[in-house]
Image (cartoon, rainbow, N blue to C red):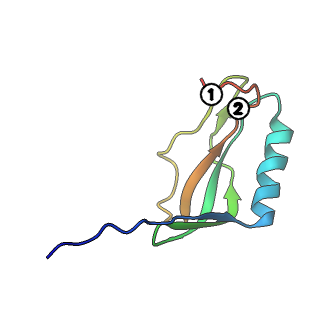
Amino acid sequence: MLFKNKKLERKVSLKRDARDGILSFCKMNHPNEGILILRGKSKHGNVFIDSLVVPPFSETGSDFAGFPHNPLPLDPSYVGIVHSHPTGSAE
């Protein structure tokens, strides 16, 4: 039996509050980079982001942003991260 490949459409959606929170956080940290954890749900490849978490022990500067993953609790609602590059360089 042969199976046809179906084109999978995937979507990332975020609540307006989450979007506004990302923009506000990045503006507050400017000119430093910023990093946040995205919290939400993922079903069938579609992701819905409804809130943000400031990572514990995060460090940011003019050319870096990061956090240690060890102290994070195992939380299946963490669906990704957002990381800003205010200078325009992704290096």
Label 2 crowd bin: few (<14), some (14–19), many (20+), radius 10 Å: some
Find the distance from the CA under tag 2 to the CA under tag 1.
6 Å
Numbered tag placed on residue 68 in the rendering: none
Considering depth in this image, is 1 or 26 the residue closer to the camera? Answer: 1
> Circles 2 and 1: CB distance less than 8 Å?
yes
Residue that appears at 75% across and 60% down: 18
Q: Where's residue 24, x and y in %?
A: 84, 48
Amino acid on which the number 1 mark rests in the picture: Ala
Where is residue 51, by image quadrant?
A: bottom right
Residue that appears at 52% across and 52% down: 72
Q: Where's residue 70, x and y in %?
A: 47, 45
Q: Is residue 11 above or below residue 58?
A: below
Q: Secondary structure at mark 1?
A: loop
Query: For mark 1, what is the residue?
Result: 90
Residue that appears at 49% across and 45% down: 69
Q: Where's residue 17, x and y in %?
A: 80, 64
Considering depth in this image, is 13 or 30 the residue closer to the camera? Answer: 13
- In the picture, measured across the screen, residue 16 lies left or right of residue 64, that is right
Q: Secondary structure at mark 2?
A: loop
Q: Where's residue 37, x and y in %?
A: 62, 52
Amino acid on which the number 2 mark rests in the picture: His
Q: Earlier in the sequence, mark 2 or mark 1?
A: 2
Query: For mark 2, what is the residue?
Result: 85
Label 1 crowd bin: few (<14), some (14–19), many (20+), radius 10 Å: few
Residue that appears at 70% across and 32% down: 85
